[in-house]
């Protein structure tokens, strides 16, 4: 085996063992409200896992879809908050519906506080937004050991990613969000 081959194998092993900070940070950008940051991320090639149709980022179209999927109004709404999926009762359709800012929100906020981190703006989304959790996981991947990253992923994103993404799939997301769903599940659950 050449040194280049050994390095490639080491890199692949690292990526399958746990997600990298860059991968998690890129996913966090993809889950935020579409912005110029998202366009820049796509144009930089950081989302090489998107095919051509998925990477065609029209911010106006993505903002409309983001609003339909995550903000509402309407039954398609898929709140991107952990507490909604973990802190509620089952409704008639078997969906777990809970309050925003429930106990899961407080639990994830304690993780952030333990590392001296706070949300940038008091008007920002609740601390259990999927993008914020992935951004924090990226921070941990860059600064902490594997066990800490795995503990956070187990206690938070992995605990609710399946019902969240299942609900999204039921509401027929476009190509961009379908790809983001698949990549997030692949990265978070491995």
Image: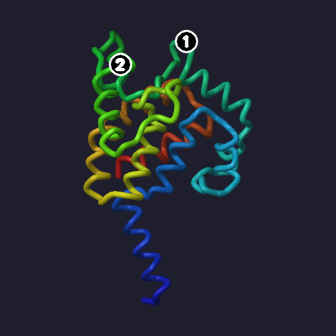
Q: Residue at x 45, y 79 (%)?
A: 7
Residue named by callout 1: 74
Q: Secondary structure at mark 1?
A: loop
Q: Position of residue 154 (x, y in %)?
A: 28, 44
Q: Which mark is residue 139?
A: none
Quadrant of the snapshot with the N terminus? bottom left
Residue 48 x/y as whole percent: 60, 57
Which residue is at a point 67% across and 56% down the rendered structure image?
44
Above or below, comparing residue 126 to residue 43 in the picture: above
Q: Residue at x 33, y 11 (%)?
A: 91
Q: Is residue 65 above or below residue 145?
A: above
The colour scheme used here is rainbow
Residue 94 falls in which quadrant of the image?
top left
Is residue 44 shown left or right of residue 156?
right
Say which residue appears at 60% left-offset and 28% top-offset: 66
Crowding at mark 2 (Cα within 10 Å: few <14, some 14-19, many 20+): some
Q: Position of residue 118 (x, y in %)?
A: 42, 37
Q: Earlier in the sequence, mark 2 or mark 1?
A: 1
| The disc label shown at residue 95, or none | 2
Q: Residue furthest top?
A: 92
Q: Are marks 2 and 1 in contact (CB under 8 Å)?
A: no
Q: Nearer the viewer, residue 101 or 27?
A: 101
Total residue callouts: 2
Give the Cα separation between the discs numbered 2 and 1: 15 Å
Residue closer to the observer: 105 or 14: 105
Measuring from the top left, give residue 36's x and y in whole percent.
70, 41
Q: Residue furthest bottom?
A: 2
Mark 1 Cα-neighbour bin, 10 Å: few <14, some 14–19, many ≥20: few
Among all residues in the image, which is located at the extreme front?
116
Q: Label 2, secondary structure: give it.
A: loop
Locate residue 71: give its quadrant.
top right
């Amino acid at each position: 085996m050449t040194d280049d081959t050994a390095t490639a194998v080491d890199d692949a092993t690292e990526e399958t063992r746990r997600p990298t900070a860059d991968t998690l940070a890129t996913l966090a950008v993809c889950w935020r409200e579409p912005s110029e940051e998202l366009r820049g991320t796509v144009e930089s090639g950081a989302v090489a896992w998107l095919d051509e149709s998925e990477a065609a980022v029209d911010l106006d179209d993505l903002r409309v879809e983001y609003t339909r999927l995550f903000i509402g109004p309407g039954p398609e709404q898929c709140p991107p908050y952990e507490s909604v999926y973990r802190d509620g009762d089952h409704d008639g359709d078997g969906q777990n519906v809970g309050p925003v800012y429930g106990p899961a929100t407080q639990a994830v906020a304690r993780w952030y506080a333990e590392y001296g981190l706070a949300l940038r703006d008091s008007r920002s989304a609740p601390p259990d937004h999927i993008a914020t959790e992935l951004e924090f996981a990226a921070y941990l991947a860059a600064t902490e050991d594997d066990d800490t990253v795995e503990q956070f992923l187990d206690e938070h994103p992995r605990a609710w990613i399946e019902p969240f993404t299942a609900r999204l799939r039921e509401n027929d997301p476009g190509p961009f969000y379908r790809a983001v769903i698949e990549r997030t599940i692949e990265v978070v659950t491995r």
